[in-house]
Amino acid sequence: MIASFSRNFIFIKPRKAAGTSLEIVLSAACSGRDVCTPISPADEPLRASHGGRARNHRDWLGRRRFYNHMPAAEVERRLPELWRSAFRFTVERHPYEKVLSLAWFRAGPNGGSGKDIAARIESEIARRDYLNHPLYTIGGRIAVDEVWEYDRLADHVRSAGERLGLAPDISLPRAKSGFRKDPRPAAEVLTQGQRRRIRDDAAFEFELMGYEP
């Protein structure tokens, strides 16, 4: 999550929708009392190479005040004045792809046998933490100004770059990549029953983004 007082924006970080890559470039535009939450230790050097870092996410006693994947409702409670004035945005991705991406990510770079991935897919569907809409809604209503499409993320970044303080030729780094070893679209990997369960659980996201089932 990033809350920028200097640029007047709030980024609600999604899961498995290039959130870390976007957070890396956004944090490079932050300064002063802007809030940038930590990312994984493996990705912090990449963020540093882009000029960003975690900042202002703890209170004066060192207690965590802001954190990764912090939901909109909690950000609003902690930063009510900025919330009212800031440009608020997030990113969304097809739920099938998020499930498969999580399965491969949690298998790790050395995991991923067919049997292992099949079991992990079932686990991710059951866990339901691939769902991003609880992060960017409050009381069942969208709480951000824009929900960017993952498949058009580069276009969104270019369009909003000046507003967010990004260079006009900015490109997103590929953070948390290289885990997925099967290039097939998720719809070809998931079973009919798995797709149905995901559609039921992610009905809000399918309707909002107009995703094909």
Image (spheres, grey):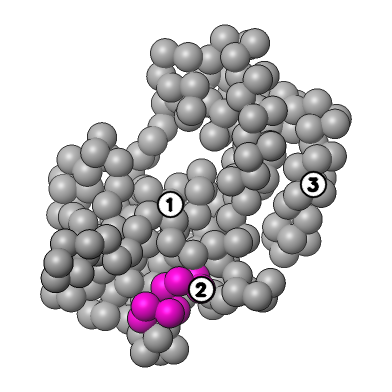
Q: Which residue is mark 3?
A: 199
N-terminal of the two: label 2 or label 1? 1
Q: Nearer the viewer's eye, disc 3 or disc 1?
A: 3
Disc 2 packing (10 Å; few <14; some 14–19; many ≥20): some
What's the residue at 67%, 19% (across, down)?
Answer: 118
125 displayed left or right of 170: right
N-terminal of the two: label 3 or label 1? 1
Residue 9 marker: none
Residue 19 marker: 1
N-terminal of the two: label 2 or label 3? 2
What's the residue at 44%, 79% (across, down)?
Answer: 76
Rendering coords of residue 80 (x, y %): 40, 86
Rendering coords of residue 99 (x, y %): 63, 37
200 displayed left or right of 175: right
Rounded to the nearest whole Å, what is the CA distance between mark 2 and mark 3?
Answer: 25 Å
Rounded to the nearest whole Å, what is the CA distance between mark 3 and mark 1?
Answer: 22 Å
